[in-house]
Amino acid sequence: MNSTKERDQQDVSDSPRQSKSAVSMKQKSEPGNENQFPSQQPARKSSLFVFAATVLILGGAGLIGWMGGWFEKAGPRGQPPTLKPIPSQYDPDRVMGYMLRLCEFGPRPSGSPAMKAQQDYLQEFFVQRGANVSFQRLETRHPETGSPVPLANLIASWGPDRPKRFLLCAHYDTRPYPDQDRDNPKGVFIGANDGASGTAALMEMSHQFASLPADIGVDVVLFDAEEFVWQQGRDEYFLGSGFFAENYKANPPAVPYQSGVLLDMIGDRELRIYYEQNSLRYARDVTRSIWKTAQRLGVQAFVPRARHTISDDHIPLNQIAKIPTTDLIDFDYPRPGIGAPSYWHTEKDIPENCSGESMAAVVWVVHQWILSQ
């Protein structure tokens, strides 16, 4: 499997309601596609039917023409994420330590004892950082056994009544199996990059929140069940973010979020974060302003060029909750190019293939961007 991948999207605002307000989203079986939407229920609007058919036709080729960089040369780039040293307040060793601690829990699929242990640890951690911490709880059915599975989004808040509020989010669950691993697709999936990197980065960023300006508030939200998927093409994606978005829409806060940033797969040793197409579609100003901040700081890991179209937790946030949210994601793990390896959804998604410097660079950019708003 090559390392160029694409996630597609459909308008979830037209999707039928699921139990517990979950948004039904499934993965297609085309090579290289993660977390794509299904054709779903027969009772669909005709426009969505046409869209789904188009996705199937295009997906069969395994290659979408607008994905720039497909023919980038494979091989290590050896390019650091920044042109100058990262300020000491954003600590690469500390954020790497957070990733290692999360991975020490082992695989962390939704509803597992390891997920519960991780939740307890993170609750205590964010309380120590001065946050008000709560859990938004929901329940789903295990797609294999039908038994109930408890889910919980973790919400850590700083300054919830301040006039400028920002949503910073990641998913903290891991996929049940490394389904893209050619040698052992039912093996052990640690999810260092795809699961722990975004969470670790938000842990690192939280060290800055005690000194936020008096008019800025931040919520860190860790979504459960981003990929509680046991069978490709059958099971639902984005249960936690879908539930969060539905509740935000039904019960809008007194001070709404000004915008949101999703961190996903930002720990790559060879970090390159391109504009994501859905982020440009729904949150163009947010997206471009973050890249301008990166350019000002000399963080060359942010590439001002569109590459992937990705369905991720930012889709329900944009479409249902109407929170303009951008997705910061390096979907070429470890690098793009024909013949390049791919660690995505394999047993090689481990801390040894990640970088504290990459995560710290992203933390630097996002924190400075918030301060500039």
Image: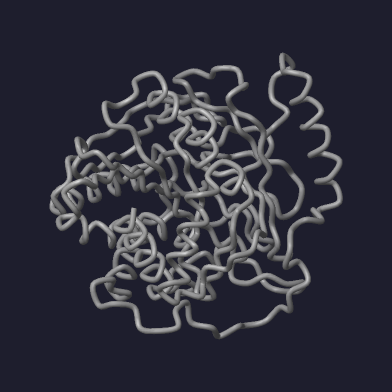
Q: Quadrant of residue 25?
A: top right
Q: Quadrant of residue 137?
A: top left
Extreme top residue here?
43
Residue at position x 28%, y 73% from top? 91
Q: Quadrant of residue 212?
A: bottom left
Residue at position x 78%, y 71% from top? 71
**Front one among 51 and 115:** 51
Q: Position of residue 262 (x, y in %)?
A: 45, 49
Left or right, residue 191 beside residue 218: right
Q: Would you place residue 118 above or below residue 232 in this image?
A: below
Left or right, residue 195 beside residue 99: right
Figure coloring: one colour
Left or right, residue 126 beside residue 372: left
**Front one among 93 and 175:** 93
**Front one among 8 and 371:** 371
Number of labels in the image equals 0
Which part of the image, by quadrant, shows the N terminus? bottom right
Q: Would you place residue 318 above or below residue 357 in this image?
A: above
Residue at position x 39%, y 75% from top? 357
Q: Position of residue 188 (x, y in %)?
A: 51, 57
Left or right, residue 112 beside residue 144: left
Q: Position of residue 133 (x, y in %)?
A: 20, 40
**Front one among 106 and 242:** 242
Q: Position of residue 53 (x, y in %)?
A: 83, 32
